[in-house]
Image (cartoon, helix red, strand yellow):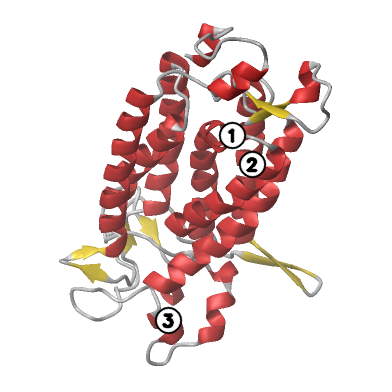
């Protein structure tokens, strides 16, 4: 019996001469551009001292690190297509076929962002807080690549928004060990995650504006909100995945990472409430009118007693209590 459904795109690759243009790559690139744009808008407004050049420099390091980390996570957690029986190790390099694990992308991308932030003298938590909503938007746009690749869809469904998949992209039914019948429609998990991520980006913006979050708490809230959605969406998928105690590995990862992020959100909020007044880690002393051109002083939030003694003020005196709140 026919029912309403969502069609899959007829193709995911176009050719300009001999050069292939892949929808998956375009979706990833579009997501990166949007994330950088959102981060720039927020970074230059939330605190003093942040510039567009800072965002570009940090992105210059974070993006390639993130792509490599995402691919490494995918290959390590799903090694069978590359190193299992009949696998092809060279295909581990075929990023355009799909397979970028968000946890590896965030972890290694975070390392790249740290390098870029250090080079720009930027507090990494300030940048991470500015970037967090943009990450969700980027991930939402990136899921369109899965739609074009006809991959990572969910279990069969007869709901009106079931996703139609071409016969060449049908996977094996884990319950029977046979390929799903032609005409089966599936949960469009790419669409579920797309909508979830956009909604949670709005929630993050509201939380940040309402409670003036800082010191990395917007980023930790991002991780909590994303893992809440990723856990139930991942459980719907029927593509091949490694399981631990009956659950897909990425479900366990969502649980562990989400709980860790929640703990970090609470602890940081108690130890460092409020928001940083300045994006810079240090202010050059010559900018403050000091004679020594290479001397540096810390910002009020990081100043030590020795710094204050050198400036002629008693160690217990704070010239701007509000700035260190």
Please tell me how crowded label 3 is: few (under 14), some (14-19), or many (20+) other residues with Cα within 10 Å: some
Reply above or below: 311 against 270.
above
Q: Secondary structure at mark 3?
A: helix
Asked if residue 300 is positioned above or below residue 81 in the image, the reply reads above
Q: Residues within 10 Å of mark 2 (few under 14, many from 20)?
A: many
The residue that label 3 is drawn on is 81
232 horizontally vs 140: left or right: left
Residue 73 x/y as whole percent: 44, 65
Residue 42, quarter of picture = top right
Q: Residue at x 57, y 7 (%)?
A: 320
Q: Residue 96 placed where, x, y %?
A: 59, 68
Element marked by disc 2: helix
Report which residue position mark 2 lands on.
Answer: 117
Give coordinates of residue 306: x percent, y percent.
58, 24
Q: Viewed as shown, does residue 304 lie left or right of 243?
A: right
Question: Do residues under tags 3 and 1 come within 8 Å of each other at their CB atoms?
Answer: no
- Compared across the picture, whether 188 is left or right of 71 comes to left
How far apart marks 3 and 1 lie (CA) works out to: 40 Å
Q: Look at 37% across and 46% down and name the residue there.
A: 192
Residue found 46% across the figure and 64% down from its top: 150
Query: Residue under circle 1?
Result: 123
Assess whether mark 2 and mark 1 are in contact (beta carbons under 8 angstroms): yes
Instruction: Categorize mark 1 by other alpha carbons within 10 Å: few (<14), some (14-19), many (20+).
Output: many
Looking at the image, the residue that sits furthest to the bottom is 86
Figure disc tally: 3
């Amino acid at each position: 019996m026919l029912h309403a459904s969502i069609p899959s795109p007829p193709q995911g690759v176009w050719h300009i001469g001999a050069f292939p243009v892949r929808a998956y790559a375009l979706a990833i690139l579009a997501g990166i551009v949007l994330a950088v744009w959102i981060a720039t808008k927020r970074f230059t407004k939330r605190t003093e001292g942040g510039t567009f050049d800072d965002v570009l420099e940090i992105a210059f390091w974070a993006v390639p690190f993130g792509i490599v980390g995402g691919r490494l996570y995918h290959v390590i957690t799903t090694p069978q297509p590359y190193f299992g029986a009949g696998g092809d190790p060279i295909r581990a390099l075929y990023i355009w076929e799909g397979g970028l694990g968000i946890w590896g992308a965030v972890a290694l991308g975070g390392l790249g962002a740290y390098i870029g932030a250090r080079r720009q003298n930027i507090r990494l938590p300030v940048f991470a807080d500015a970037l967090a909503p943009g990450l969700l938007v980027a991930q939402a746009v990136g899921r369109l690549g899965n739609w074009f690749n006809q991959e990572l869809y969910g279990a069969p469904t007869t709901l009106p928004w079931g996703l139609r998949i071409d016969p060449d992209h049908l996977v094996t039914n884990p319950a029977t060990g046979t390929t799903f019948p032609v005409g089966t429609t599936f949960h469009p998990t790419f669409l579920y995650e797309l909508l979830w991520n956009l909604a949670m980006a709005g929630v993050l913006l509201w939380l940040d504006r309402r409670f003036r979050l800082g010191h990395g708490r917007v980023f930790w809230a991002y991780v909590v909100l994303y893992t809440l959605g990723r856990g139930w969406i991942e459980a719907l998928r029927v593509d091949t995945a490694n399981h631990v105690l009956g659950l897909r590995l990425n479900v366990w990862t969502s649980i562990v990472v989400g709980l860790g992020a929640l703990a970090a959100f609470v602890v940081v909020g108690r130890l460092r409430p409020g928001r940083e007044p300045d994006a810079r880690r240090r202010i050059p002393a010559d900018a403050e009118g000091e004679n020594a051109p290479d001397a540096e002083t810390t910002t009020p939030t990081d100043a030590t007693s020795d710094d204050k003694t050198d400036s002629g003020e008693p160690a217990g005196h704070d010239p701007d209590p509000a700035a260190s709140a």
